[in-house]
Image (spheres, rainbow, N blue to C red):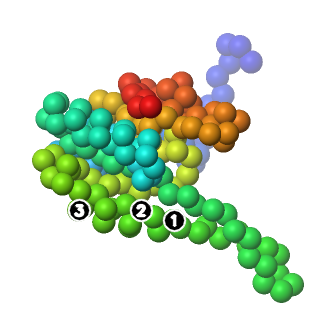
Amino acid sequence: MAGHEIPEPADRKQVADPMADLEAAEQTRHSCDPAFQHGVVVGFDGSVSSERALAYAIGMARRSGSGLIIVHVANRLPTTVWAGCEPPVFVDVPDHRTEVLGLELACADHLAEIPWILVERGGDICHELEEVGQEYAADAIVVGSTHGIVGRIFGSVAGRLARRAQRPVIVIP
């Protein structure tokens, strides 16, 4: 009703400020090492194209004097478990490839010259790479190009990331 004010009852509870909830969530999220702020994020899964992307990102981080944030987005496969008469349960099966990649990277001579970390995430590759880039205020995200029929059908990770990212995306063939 225009022109009429409805008085607030004295016992009404205050509604929580949604911005305060967002700030609290950001504070509880793990704080990133300042050495990697404004670093270079690179998607890495051990494939040939991701190894090329890693090599480029290493050079980029070395030239800019920043840290390297290597991101492995693990395959988390929903698996149905049927337990007799119970309804099916969906179980999140972790990908142990990150541990193997971490050991390989730790032994790599070309990473000895720059500070780097390996971050494991689960979920959509594009979303996770952009989220890590946002958390670390990354200067760029480097990814390898996707080859094959899956990339043609569903769209490549590089293409989807380039369309949605809020920072430069460098695609290495």
- In the image, 48 versus 27, the foreground residue is 48
Disc 3/disc 2 C-alpha distance (Å): 14 Å
The reply to whether discs 3 and 2 touch (Cβ–Cβ < 8 Å) is no
The residue carrying mark 1 is 95
- In the image, 107 versus 19, the foreground residue is 107
Disc 1/disc 3 C-alpha distance (Å): 21 Å
Question: Does the image show residue 135?
Answer: no
Q: Is residue 22 left or right of residue 31?
A: right
Q: Height in image: 143 above or below 120?
A: above
Disc 2/disc 1 C-alpha distance (Å): 7 Å
Return the x and y of residue 130 as percentages of the image width and height.
Answer: 44, 37
For numbered disc 1, what is the local secondary structure?
A: loop
Question: Does the image show residue 76?
Answer: yes
Residue at 55% over, 58% down:
75
Return the x and y of residue 119 as percentages of the image width and height.
Answer: 36, 54
Q: Is residue 154 left or right of residue 164?
A: right
State which quadrant residue 132 falls in: top left
Residue at 30% over, 66% down:
103
Residue extending farthest to the top is: 3
The reply to whether discs 1 and 3 touch (Cβ–Cβ < 8 Å) is no
The residue carrying mark 3 is 107
The reply to whether discs 2 and 1 touch (Cβ–Cβ < 8 Å) is yes
The residue carrying mark 2 is 98
How many marks can you see?
A: 3
Amino acid at the residue labelled 3: Cys
Q: Residues within 10 Å of mark 1 (few under 14, many from 20)?
A: some
Amino acid at the residue labelled 1: Asp
